[in-house]
Image: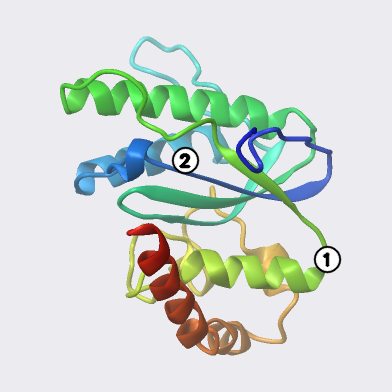
Amino acid sequence: MPTKNVAKIFVPNAFFHVYNRGWNLGKIFIDEADYRYFEQLLARHLSPQSTEDTNGKAYKHFYPEVHLTAYCLMGNHFHILFYQYDESAITRLMTSLMTAYTAYFNKRHKRRGSLFESTYKAVWVGGDAQLQHITRYIHLNHTGYAKWSHSSYQDYFNNTRTWINPKPILDLFSSLEQYRQFVADYEAVQRERDSIKSELYGR
């Protein structure tokens, strides 16, 4: 049987929740340098301005075909919400991102083989209610979500990183404070569900 959400059908002008975890629940981010490198790859691919390597060769650049709307990096998994204008954009972006990160991680930590459990998963997100909910689900992944630096939560209130675009979500709320409360109101529910998952799957 194929793994759920591995066989992906992408459409243009749509939001997708993309996620993956480490092989056998292993770590994909061991220390601060790993988190930063993954975020550097996201910035390289998704900032409005393209960048070049030390030889003057342009890195692969997917803006404005794809916008990153929300994300959270955890020790053994990640969640990202993308909006794509071109139906192949996320596929091309994720191929580049995961190949580059795996090569970096294996070299730095002196290992070989697959880093991730499988190819990434992707779920189409349709409708305002589902879109609102998936962003708080992503942001609440970390128990210290309000201060966790490797997510987009703080960017919703002080957006200084140009490769993150929270506007489509914030436009669904009357104020920043309403979004803050929307996330906080769901924290107890998500923690209970996290506890159940941990008991069932040993995570």
Up/down of 175 relative to 54, above or below: below
- Mark 2–mark 1 CB contact (< 8 Å): no
**Quarter residue 22 falls in:** top left
**Quarter residue 41 falls in:** top left
Q: Nearer the viewer, residue 91 or 202?
A: 202
Measured from the top left, where is residue 188 in percent x and y?
46, 87
Measured from the top left, where is residue 181 in percent x and y?
55, 89
Q: Which residue is mark 2?
A: 43
Q: Which residue is mark 1?
A: 127
Up/down of 63 relative to 168, above or below: above
Left or right, residue 189 beside residue 35: right
Q: Say which quadrant the N terminus sits in.
A: top right
Disc 1 marks a residue whose amino acid type is: Gly
Up/down of 93 relative to 76, above or below: above
> Element at badge 1?
loop
Measured from the top left, where is residue 79 in percent x and y?
51, 52
- The numbered disc on residue 95 is none
Left or right, residue 10 beside residue 100: right
Residue drawn at the location 21% of the way across and 49% of the way down: 32
Residue drawn at the location 60% of the way across and 85% of the way down: 182
Up/down of 46 relative to 115, above or below: below
